[in-house]
Image (spheres, coloured by chain):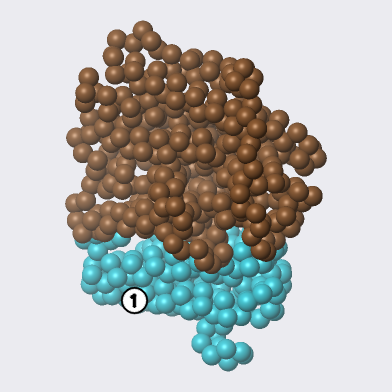
Amino acid sequence: MLNSSPMGPTSLFGEAMALGLASGPACVASCGPVLVPSSLAEGAGLRLNVRYLSAFLGMRFLGYLVFAALAWEVGTLLSVAPTARSLVFGTVHILLAGVLLWYAYAAGRICTHACAGSELVTIGPSGKRGVPGAAVLGFLTGVSLCPPFVAAAVRVAELGSLAAALFFFTVFFVGTSVWFVPFVGLGYVRRNEAVTTVARMAMVLVAFYYAYLGLMMLVGRSAYGYPR
Amino acid sequence: MATQDKRLPPQPLRSVGRSLLLTLPIAVWSLLMFGHFWQPDRSAQIASVTTAVFMIALFFMMMRTSRTYRWRRWFFVALGLLFPVGFIHQVIAMRGTMGIPIEEMIAGRTPFCYIPIPMLILPAALMKTVVFPGSIRPHGGMSGGGMAAMAGIWLAMTLVIGKGWCSYACFFGGIEEGMASVPPKAKVRKIDPRWRYGPWAVLLVMVLMSLALFEPAYCMWLCPFKAVSEYVAARNTVGTVQNGIFVLLFATLVIALPLLTKKRTQCAFFCPFGAFQSIFNKTSIFDVKIDRSRCTPCVLCQKSCPTLSLTDESIVKGETLMSCMKCGACVDACPKDAAVWHIKGTEVAVKPERARLMFLYAAWAMAIMFGGSIIAEGLQTILHVFI
């Protein structure tokens, strides 16, 4: 298991934690356009915001583990045929855009006035049967390709076992998550029509960007139209 | 609220002598800035003198008539129209084209504009990097002054006049103000007030995207004024799409909607810098208040506001929203002199003319230094054709 890795668990832990902590600002930068507006579209209050962030980070962690397993299984995602890679990540980005648009719509449906609801905005059927939007967004950002992720995936591909890969990504996740703790403070931002409207408009703009990026990925191009 | 008497009462004119006396400090400042009569270049000479006379004359009229918006608008529209003239000429002289090639951006040979300032803060704080691809050195980049000088001027003036920057310094807003003043009446009068939050949404997204993409995302994708300054040197379809977005936003927000609504729609519903600048209305000591004891209320102030910065609720509270650009439209429009200039910490409507004068000296001094030099450069470019 972990001992089958050429490195011991302690040094593996140290490397993953260091990589996670060092990559944190880049992770915040990558997830910020999704996390900040969607969090502001929720109700106010520290407890609700902690629940939002927990759902987001929890499912982002699940995304990491799926990615870790995949990265280890296929050697490294970077060696996968560019067409298949673009197809996967292009689809993920378009899904992310769709969910953001739905979130913007659903947030308007729930937070019509004081926006003080104690439940998270849900995607799908209204009420308890819907899936919390934070969880869906967390998972989709978790499986998106971002620079810190690539760094971790390349390292994971060199590890000897799946367990070591999962362990590495778990510790890496914890390291990056430290940087997300200040986002709990968004719960203290007073919610009114202005904040909710700004958050919803922002989600629509970010959705357009992800949809565009996804489409460009599907045709094998970068955001500026150069071949990937 | 019902509209009552719409006729403006005749304003008593200030005496010529007193108006001249009040204009004297501004005249001295103008001559210091533009009095280069010994210049060998005749077109530069004429442009400087014309600009100085223009700025002094407008200030004199502000003093004589006690009106602000009507005269400020002439300056602002001239600034908006002449900025592209001078800028495009300079760009073409240096580069041979209005398009910026990527190599020029990487080399940092791009002129610095104040609009990305709010988008530079997060990347600089988290990554210790300025993401704008312009030079930080004096005389670096095409702007001459460079990034540091532009940021310094902006900060100093912003702390004093707050969002007044958007009415006395912005070299883009004049085009839409000009467009908004063309039709006698607005064709579209019902505007959902929630569009007022648009600039904040664009600001939020652009700050986050600039950090995520590590580039000034607004300049790359959404700036309407790229259409009249410098566009992307398109080398593929995406470059064409970027330029298409710039032109579409310009045609919609700066031309069509101001013509239909008589509002500064780009400033009111889109500009992220304007949203950022609103925050500094809290630091500025100047604001515009509604004197509740005089207000009827006829809502003429609300109708005249080019950025929807007055609502029924704010009038009841006797204040403007934080998006107020201190253009003076509401003060000029009020038939009861209830909309007044005000210095924070003083009583409302006690010597409002003194508050107006203090604000105007600061704002007009900046207008001369910043906008005036742009007007002079634009005029000089035009005069070069004939002389």
Read off the residue under disc 1: A91
B328 vs B380, left or right, is right
Q: Which residue corresponds to the image point at 36% horizontal and 70% vertical from the top-left?
A: A211
Mark 1 is on which residue type? Answer: Thr
- Count of marks overlaid on the render: 1
Specify the subunit that label 1 lies on: A
> What is chain A's hue in the picture?
cyan
Classify B138 as above or below A46: above
Residue A228 image offset from top left, x and y in percent: 24, 62
> Quadrant where the C terminus of chain B lies?
top left
Q: Please name the residue shown 73% across and 52% down the image.
A: B295
Closer to the camera, A53 or B120?
B120
Above or below B384: residue B198: below
Q: Nearer the viewer, residue A154 or B25?
A: B25
Q: Nearer the viewer, residue A20 or B358?
A: B358
User: Could you say which is closer to the camera, residue B170 or residue A46?
Assistant: B170
Tell me the quarter of the picture where residue A126 sits: bottom right
Image quarter of residue A192? bottom right
Label 1: how many residues lie within 10 Å, few (<14), some (14-19) or many (20+)? some
- In this rendering, would A162 be left or right of A74? right
Q: Residue furthest top?
A: B38
How far from the left and from the top, in percent, is residue A166?
Answer: 47, 74
Indicate the secondary structure of the residue bearing disc 1. Answer: helix
- Residue B318 screen position, x and y as percent: 73, 52
Judge whether residue A161 can be spotted in this image. no
Residue B332, x across and y down, in percent: 60, 42
The brown-coloured chain is labelled B
Would you identify the image quadrant in which residue A130 lies?
bottom right
Residue found at x 28% / y 14%: B41
Q: Left or right: where does residue A174 sit relative to residue B81?
A: right
- Is residue A129 among the parts visible in the rendering? yes
